[in-house]
Image (spheres, rainbow, N blue to C red):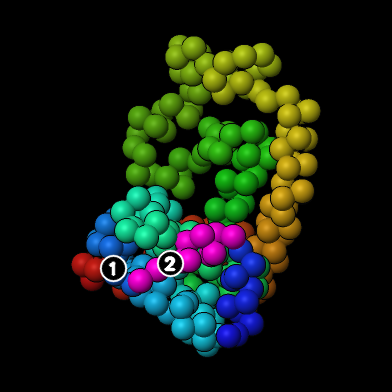
Amino acid sequence: MGKLYDELCKDYRFKEGMKTCINCGTCTAICPAAEFYKYDPRKILDTVQRKNDDDILALLKSETIWYCGECMSCLTRCPRKNGAGLVIMALRNLSAKLGYFTESERGRQLYPLTKALNRNILDYGYCVHPETFAYEDHPESGPVQEWVLNNKEEVYGRMGANYMKPGNGALRKIDKADLDELQAIFDATGGTERMELVEKYSEQKAAEMGMTPDEYLKYTFTHCSPGHFNSE
């Protein structure tokens, strides 16, 4: 048994996700991600069950663990009530903690996700917020969405939203006391530490790749190399 396996065993998701796995492959058969990506949950569980640090290290640095959508279809179909998705969560957690996520293209996307999603939650109280949704980053949303973003207050007002104003209603401005409570939750549960680690390792990788943090953020958000999909 290796040190990395021991670290995984400290994660309750790992214990719950693989406690009675028999490698039947039902998780792979039902997995939506496996239909599109070069991804096989059963093989990941088989690899981890060997408890070999070299194999686990390869997983932590791989693209593979970042293909899962965490939909937990595996858990609903497993005859032994395992959840490959839970094991994936534990592997991702350890990869982020140790900085190995920067070794894969999909893993590096943790940086823009952390910067956008977590900062939206802490700054606005929403996972996605119109104030931080830039059309130039999402041209696939189309010209109608561009027009909506340029006329936010009028459009959301027509829909009954209380956009960025105090009080009740959708898209209302969240009270500072509530935002402070969210920050306290992040601090107490390790979320703040996770954000700091992701930023630290990502900025190190940016320097290694000869990029500024802003250039690296844009690159990891938009770049997609061939080879990830079954159709390729």
Query: Who's the residue at 66% across and 13% down the image?
Result: 167
Identify the mark at residue 78; answer none if there is no mark.
none
Q: Position of residue 53 (x, y in %)?
A: 55, 85
Q: Is residue 98 above or below residue 141?
A: below
Q: Earlier in the sequence, mark 1 or mark 2?
A: 2
Q: Quadrant of residue 15?
A: bottom right
Secondary structure state at the residue bearing disc 2: loop
Q: Position of residue 116 (x, y in %)?
A: 58, 47
Identify the mark at residue 20; answer none if there is no mark.
2
Q: Quadrant of residue 77?
A: bottom left
Q: Which residue is mark 1?
A: 25
Quadrant housing the C terminus: bottom left
Q: Amino acid at mark 2?
A: Thr
Secondary structure state at the residue bearing disc 1: loop
Is residue 177 something that shows in the picture? yes
Q: Quadrant of residue 26?
A: bottom left
Query: Is the Cβ of the residue at disc 1 closer than 8 Å to that at disc 2?
Result: no
Instruction: Say which of 35 and 225 sits in front.
Output: 35
**Going by the image, does 19 lie left or right of 202?**
left
**Going by the image, does 193 lie left or right of 65?**
right
Query: Who's the residue at 35% across and 50% down the image?
Result: 76
Residue stretch in magenta:
12-22
Question: In front of the other: label 1 or label 2?
Answer: 2
Q: Position of residue 67 (x, y in %)?
A: 40, 63
